Image (tube, rainbow, N blue to C red):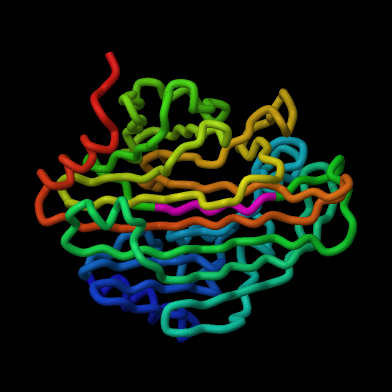
Amino acid sequence: MGHVFDELVRRTRGTAIVLEVPDARLALCPTLGGRLFAELAGQFLHRVDLAAVAHPNNPFNNFGGNNFWPAPEGGKFGFNYRGDEWYVQPCINSQPFEKLWAEMSAAAVQKQVTLTNRAGVTVTAAMRRELRLGPLPPWLSQAGAEQAFSYVTRDSFTVLGSTPVEEALIAAWSLEQFRATAGTTAFCLVEQPEAAINFDYYEHPAERITYHQHGLTYRTDGQRRGQIGIRAGAGARCIGFYDVPARLLCVRDNRCAVGGIYFNVADNDQPQGPYSAADSYSIFNSNPDMGAFELETVGAAQVEQGILKGSELSSATSFLAFPDSSALERFLEEQLGPKEA
């Protein structure tokens, strides 16, 4: 599978920033919306659309990988609508990032964007992504994986000018996209899981959810569009996915400091207003046309004296490859606990 990573880098025409550690490679792609793509032990980990990488001329260049996106998507302050038409603004869809610096284990890119929300208000901001390779979280280092690596992204919007919060909201949103199969299942580690979920998205996917003592699972097979949020106030430890046949585990940890304003980021009309939900995580399952799912972390808006200042989101992503499926299953059972009756 190493050829997929190499082909991706080749099609970025020398612009990709490649970081390497033993057993793993990570590409930060300034010309692909600052997206990240990873490989572990020769296995390419993300969904990628190589045709779109080679010819990025679509109304929405859905390259795959780990994407940095402005929230909210819908509602009266949504950045993805012109009236009732879903729309990706050019500064997000096609404007490249500028490389600020790159080292052996870290890099940073930035661009200035001008976004117009559904209310017609323009927000100009510095959009910055920093990437750093790091150690596995201690609880994962004890999991018994054969190969593993971890990285942290720090995504931020710094609003330029003076925009009242009554006219606009903005939050950093990291959407990490993976190929869906019959063996991929997303999860969330959270106490009181039934109270933690926000269903204010596309549909109510209750048949896909199984509750456990210390969390929940959500079947992510890319066969029916659905989405759930995890409330910021629920105190979730992390979200992730596992693929038992592939012996693969992915964990995403939202490391945002306490503070700021969480709001409804959902791609819908938000009839109860922009503050009707407050999620720090989300899990999305696509239709067969994309055949993917996303593990999403969401930041909070920073507001001072009624003026929108920006948003900062720190997210850690870890990948672990286990020596056999039983080792992965044992670790999952330890973390999630028994199924609830």
* Residue 66 drawn at (x, y percent): 46, 59
Query: Is residue 2 at all visible to an observer of this figure?
Result: yes
* Residue 125 drawn at (x, y percent): 76, 63
| Residue 33, picture quadrant | bottom right
Q: Nearer the viewer, residue 79 or 136?
A: 136
Q: Nearer the viewer, residue 291 or 326?
A: 326
Which residue lies at the image location 68% right of the left edge and 72% below the top edge? Answer: 111
Which residue lies at the image location 41% right of the left edge and 33% below the top edge? Answer: 190
Does the magenta segment cover residue 175? yes
138 up-or-down from 100: above or below: above
* Residue 149 drawn at (x, y percent): 31, 65
| Residue 224, picture quadrant | top left
* Residue 70 drawn at (x, y percent): 65, 53
Q: Is residue 145 left or right of residue 178?
A: left
Does the magenta segment cover residue 317? no
Which residue lies at the image location 49% right of the left edge and 47% below the top edge? Answer: 296
Magenta residues span 171-177
314 up-or-down from 52: above or below: above
